[in-house]
């Protein structure tokens, strides 16, 4: 992030924080100290039971520390009224934790309502947040959680966490309960949001690949939240601090470098023929024939890619509506090259790429990813050959 870009997040500092439960001989979290930089994503990764969730929950005092000091934007979190504190911190959890008898709009409006915002301001904010997380208010605002997919529920959960514009967002394995493709899309969505919002985010996961993809910095934690290594993903992949961290990195560390490179880092192709929903099949067929292509990419009114249509399907059709093959997977500029490779395998070819608000930005080709992998391997081999 450039130095002059505005950051809405604030620094979090934990100093010698310990949590000891009554009747236990060893603390759940022992003397934990860390600075979380303003406007960055810091990921806590470690095995189940290591204390990572307990540590994160002490930031918003869902769990009260036994000792130590926590400051948020310079304010002592332990001296603030707990309700005031929590309204300044967004919180997103696994399976969204939505109120089942509230509509989507009512769920998102909870904290602004508690803060006493007027009705118009709340309604405007609900619509803004739904649009931000890619849910059309006209379609979704009056639905109940049970009427949403898992991925849609998580989007509502993130919108609710951000509704009052808190500087800090805590995320406790928020994407752990959805399928891999949806999980990848939600990760991309979070990265896209972060480029706009620049919150301070503490994210808990047990998935090291997720940590590498999302984190500006990663804290690899051992028992009692002992910090085994706290550094950038690049540094941890290149130089694990010890055997335990190396175990998290796992085999194929050089291939994991694909998760450090984003689609925005490589050249996109602009060779796909794009058409809009309102064009006639005859005009699309003419465009395909004149450009000697077989497929056209259909964009909606907001220039978001929706499906591929083949020239054969246009012969007797009277409208583009419902024609073509819906896209199974789309990647964004925030997606990793590993995501792009997986999407290509699912789509069977090049994959459309979307920009900041889901608009079409180009396509990424398999040749591009293969060339990047070969370059990474060559660099990795050369690094290993250089004598110390």
Image: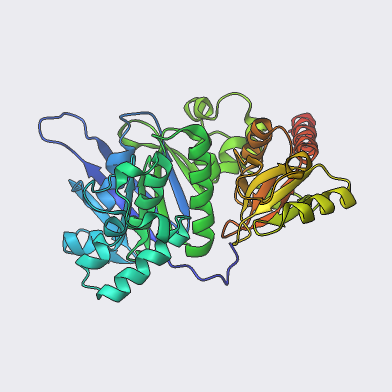
Residue 199 appears in view: no
Picture quarter containing residue 32?
A: top left
Report x, y in % for residue 336. 62, 43
Picture quarter containing residue 261?
A: top right
Where is 110 relative to 307, above or below?
below
239 left or right of 112? right
Where is 221 relative to 160, above or below?
above
Report x, y in % for residue 221. 40, 36
Report x, y in % for residue 333. 64, 52
Foreground of the two, 84 or 154 = 154
Picture quarter containing residue 239?
A: top right
Q: Residue at x 64, y 31 (%)?
A: 346
Location of the N terminus by quadrant is bottom right
Report x, y in % for residue 279. 70, 58
Which residue is outermost to the left? 23
Foreground of the two, 298 or 314 = 314
Q: Please say which color scheme the image uses.
A: rainbow
């Amino acid at each position: 992030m450039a130095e002059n870009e505005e950051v809405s997040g604030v620094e979090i500092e934990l100093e010698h924080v310990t949590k000891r439960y009554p009747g236990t001989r060893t603390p759940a979290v022992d003397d934990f100290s860390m600075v979380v930089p303003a406007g960055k994503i810091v990921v806590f990764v470690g095995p189940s039971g290591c204390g990572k969730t307990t540590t994160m929950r002490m930031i918003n005092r869902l769990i009260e520390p036994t000792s130590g000091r926590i400051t948020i934007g310079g304010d002592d979190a332990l001296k603030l009224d707990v309700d005031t504190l929590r309204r300044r911190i967004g919180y997103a959890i696994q399976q969204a934790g939505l109120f089942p008898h509230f509509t989507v709009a009512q769920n998102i409006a909870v904290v602004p309502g508690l803060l006493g915002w007027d009705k118009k301001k709340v309604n405007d904010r609900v619509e803004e947040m739904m649009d931000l997380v890619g849910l059309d208010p006209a379609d979704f605002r009056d639905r109940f959680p049970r009427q949403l997919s898992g991925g849609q529920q998580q989007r509502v959960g993130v919108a609710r966490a951000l509704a009052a514009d808190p500087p800090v967002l805590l995320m406790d394995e928020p994407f752990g309960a959805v399928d891999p493709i949806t999980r990848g899309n939600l990760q991309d969505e979070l990265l896209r949001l972060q480029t706009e919002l620049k919150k301070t985010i503490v994210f808990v996961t047990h998935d090291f690949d997720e940590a590498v993809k999302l984190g500006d910095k990663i804290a690899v934690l051992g028992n009692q939240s002992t910090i085994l290594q706290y550094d950038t993903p690049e540094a941890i992949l290149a130089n694990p601090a010890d055997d335990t961290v190396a175990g998290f990195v796992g085999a194929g560390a050089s291939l994991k470098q694909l998760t450090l490179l984003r689609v925005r880092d490589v050249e996109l192709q602009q060779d796909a023929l794009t058409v809009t929903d309102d064009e006639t099949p005859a005009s699309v067929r003419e465009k395909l024939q004149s450009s000697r292509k077989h497929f056209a990419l259909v964009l909606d009114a907001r220039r978001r890619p929706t499906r591929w249509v083949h020239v054969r399907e246009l012969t007797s059709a009277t409208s583009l509506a419902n024609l073509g093959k819906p896209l199974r997977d789309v990647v964004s500029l925030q997606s990793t090259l590993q995501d792009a490779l997986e999407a290509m395998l699912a789509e069977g070819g090049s994959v459309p790429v979307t920009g900041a608000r889901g608009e079409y930005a180009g396509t990424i080709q398999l040749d591009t990813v293969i060339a990047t992998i070969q370059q990474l391997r060559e660099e990795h081999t050369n690094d290993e050959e250089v004598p110390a």
